Image (tube, helix red, strand yellow):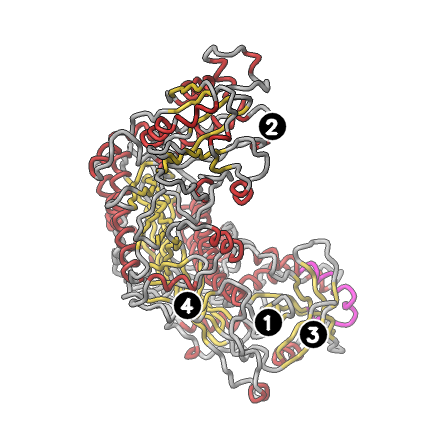
Amino acid sequence: MVYSEECDFIFRLKGILEFACQLDNPNGVQSQSTISKSFQDLRSKVTSKNIVFTVCNSPVLIWPNTGFQSSVESLTEASACGDILQWIESDDGGSKKSSKKKDKKKSGPTVVNMKLLFEVTEPAGNTAPSLIRVSTQQHCVKMPLPLDCALSVTTDERLETVCTGLVEALNKQLADMEEVVLQYRKGSSFLVPQPFHFQLPEPAGLITVVYPAGVPDSQLQAVREDLHRKFELPCDRPYLRRANAFHFPDAAYKDGYLRNPHIHLNPPNIEDAKLYLVQGVYSYHHYMQDHVDDNGWGCAYRSLQTICSWFQQQGYVETAVPTHTQIQQALVDVGDKEPRFVGSRQWIGSIEVQAVLNQLLGVTSKIMFVSQGSELATKGRELANHFQTEGTPVMIGGGVLAHTILGVVWSENTGQIRFLILDPHYTGGEDLQTITDKGWCGWKGPEFWDQNAYYNLCLPQRPKSI
Amino acid sequence: MGRSYFVDEAVGEYLSGLQAAPGSCVTGLLAGQSSPQRDFVVLAVQTPHRESEGQLKALKGVSPLDDIDVEWVTEHAKQVSRMLPGGLCVLGLFLVTPPELSKDAQNALKRLIFAVEKYIIKGRLWELSEEDVTDRVTLHICSKTKKLLCKTFDVKDPKSSAKPADWKYQTGISSSWPMLTCSVEVDLQIPVTGSSSDNTDKCMKDGLRRWAKQIEAAYCLINGRQALDDSELISGQAHVCSFQKKNPKTTNRQTLPARIFVSDEQSELGERSSALVQVCSGSMRVRGVVHCRAYIHNNKPKARHAAQAIKRDIINTVCSRVEMFLEDLCINEGSQKGLCSGQQALPRRVFAPMPISGLSVCDYMFPDESTADVAERLKEMLDCETPEEDIDTSLENNQLFSIISGFEITDSQDDDSSKHVSEIQAENHKIQKPPKYYAVGSGRYSSFMCGPCSSHCSPCHSHISTVFQLMEKAKMFV
């Protein structure tokens, strides 16, 4: 996750707008223009005086289409967007601050969450209500559109500009949604258009793409190819699959697993050495998680789970991270193990990891054999290359233990090397402090390995696809 | 530890002035506002006399208490509820009996209070929250000694027994109550599935309920401030100055504008991946602006209670007028209701000063009615004379389209509906001016105008059987 150095804030505006229309004949020629008309009405709604942005966890309300008015006197059109922070109550002031102090790394831009609302008071007229009844056979279509716009800005950008930008973004998103709805409509069956945000390499930055709900990534290949061309993205790795969607810094991961605990560590300071790290996002899997007591036998399974989580989160696969049982079953399915293997507490090694990655994820891996632990210190170049080109986590098994290697610090000249190790033998809870303090995720030297045991490493290869 | 009812002195005067025929009983309603700490009563109205020719019941003989027309009392309560702005409600009943019936009065009151509550909440689009007070007051007055016996029943619990309560008189109870106001734009598209009139009613109900939930969940600003939390509505205003105490008529009533912000979020729709498509036989649209009011007591009221009061008024006013319109329609169109098209004006809201307290009440005026009709209804329902010039009809404008000459196609670009509307213009010409029967049970029984013969007798005997048939149908709503 690399943020643009300049962007201090992300203003995120979410809201639901109900799309509704009545179609006489869903298959008729009129229906397209009826649908477009309804979208046009929604766009008018969004540019009307009635829309209001409310800043979450604050008393601030902004009317962006009335020459910028806000409910708080000190926020005017001239205000810098950073001024808004003083009004926002954070959920837990205390603990956040202390962990920030320890974090020497920049934790990324501040997210300001806003919600889209419509005022129903202060109407233009005051004609009392009428009831209008129409009795013709019609198809009544209703669909909630999940609007979600995000803007990256610097701290001195004016709040007014941000709000105008958000209104424009809403308009554009509605236009994109209209396109998607029309494209994927079959008669009276409409798919909900869903926005996804992606953080692309500069100059593109944060973009939003609308995909139709229910259509799997595999069927959206052509759409992605177009976008890869448009944004000049490499054609061999995914950037725009749903799993690649930008994870907003303030959002917790619902599954509870820690992501990339290594970013909270400082790499060792070795003279003349370079840092080669895993690319992208993985989840930390370890002993005792998911109510599975695999203490003493499950370390390789956990390393494999960490690797699977990487492929899932980079968008290469949509399948969930496999359980111990599913891993064992896969090995039976490929003929590597007898059926009674399933449910047992037998260890697995790099070869089995390779087999499961192939069977369940369609991922191929290279195996590296090291006859003595002491030799690992000489494998700097291979590992550096691996992290540079593939950037996947590496499973290493030998002696009686399995670990995951997430990166190396290696000097081409002096040969000095350190290994970034994620240890699956941890039995505690998802406590980042403990995990980093006690070295469950940490930098180790060559002495970490059993100097006399032989090791096998499984190096998963990225599939070439978008 | 019973509840305390703070009652306006003028209510006391009204109650003392009630005349009961010897040996008989008088029933009536008590209206005001409940808050967790205490309750306020600002209005008392006796049950109006019911025209009952052709229905002379032989006295059942046991007791005048048995002769109390429960149905009529509940109907009166419902009508009065519709006339109360937000924050105010019917919160109890009184019963005046001769001394010999005092013992049995409690049972009668208990029966009545539960029946009234049950009838009032029928068709209501919002639920009581946990904080709402569910105690209702029953006041028994002995016609000879004028002694008052005040008790409460918890209407949430049918088995509850009477609890003692305090009844205290004070002057100018509501003179400083702030008034919340707003005008709300309503534009609801409601699909109609099926074709019978019951279907139409159900679809309308469902559509209104969905809208009501949006309003309940809406963000609210009162007087420019957020109205979410437990903060006080008006800081530093709790003290009523002594001048006002002595001169309750001089009101220092604050008007607090409310602003309501909704989102289209509907949790029932949840995470859908496709649109909800229904095949409809038609649609209904309620479109226009409603003017809303609510009052909140000034004993350290919380902002969110004030927000709740105005929101409930918004929901009630739209629901009431739709109900009234459909009841009226049912009488006129009968079973044809589901099939017709057109644009018709819903009754519009007018306000009048409330007897006693200086608060206002409201009523609904059909397009062909006048302030004279409103004044008549106010006399009957609230037992008070209101000069016609005091009735404020300016808050909601008359719907612009002309009923006589056809109707304006409003700038609703609602797709295909507009062309259909013009086609049936001729047909609707008839419907727009229906012969109206304002019958008991549909809530418009005070001005009994018999359409077919346009006589203002009450009721016109040659049409009475039709009227009662249609009355029965009218009760079908909800």
Task: Same chain for labels 3 and 4? Say yes or no.
Answer: yes
Q: Does the segment drawn in magenta span residue B310?
A: no
Callout 4: helix, strand or loop?
strand
Which chain is disc 1 placed on? B
How far from the left and from the top, in percent, is residue B159?
Answer: 73, 54
Q: Which residue is mark 4?
A: B182
Q: Work out whether residue A126 or residue B366 is closer to the camera in this orientation and state it.
A: A126
Residue for point 24% across, 40% down: A179
How far from the left and from the top, in percent, is residue A410?
Answer: 37, 34
The quadrant of the image that shows the C terminus of chain A is top left
Callout 1: helix, strand or loop?
strand
Of the numbered discs in the image, which one, if any, rests on residue B45? 1
Task: Same chain for labels 4 and 1? Say yes or no.
Answer: yes
Q: CA distance from mark 3 to mark 4?
A: 34 Å
How far from the left and from the top, in percent, is residue B424?
Answer: 27, 49
Looking at the rendered image, the disc whose residue lies closer to the viewer, 2 or 4, is 2
Task: Same chain for labels 3 and 2? Say yes or no.
Answer: no
Q: The residue under label 1 is which amino acid type?
A: Val
Q: Work out whether residue B10 or residue A415 is closer to the camera in this orientation and state it.
A: A415
Residue stretch rendered in magenta on the structure = B95-112
Q: Are there few (<14), some (14-19), or many (20+) residues within 10 Å of tag 4?
A: many
Q: Work out whether residue A111 or residue B151 is closer to the camera in this orientation and state it.
A: A111
Residue for point 31% across, 36% down: A240
Mark 3 vs 4, N-terminal side: 3
Which chain is disc 3 placed on? B
Residue for point 47% across, 20% down: A372
Of the numbered discs in the image, which one, if any, rests on residue B167? 3
Q: CA distance from mark 2 to mark 4?
A: 65 Å
Q: Which residue is mark 2?
A: A295
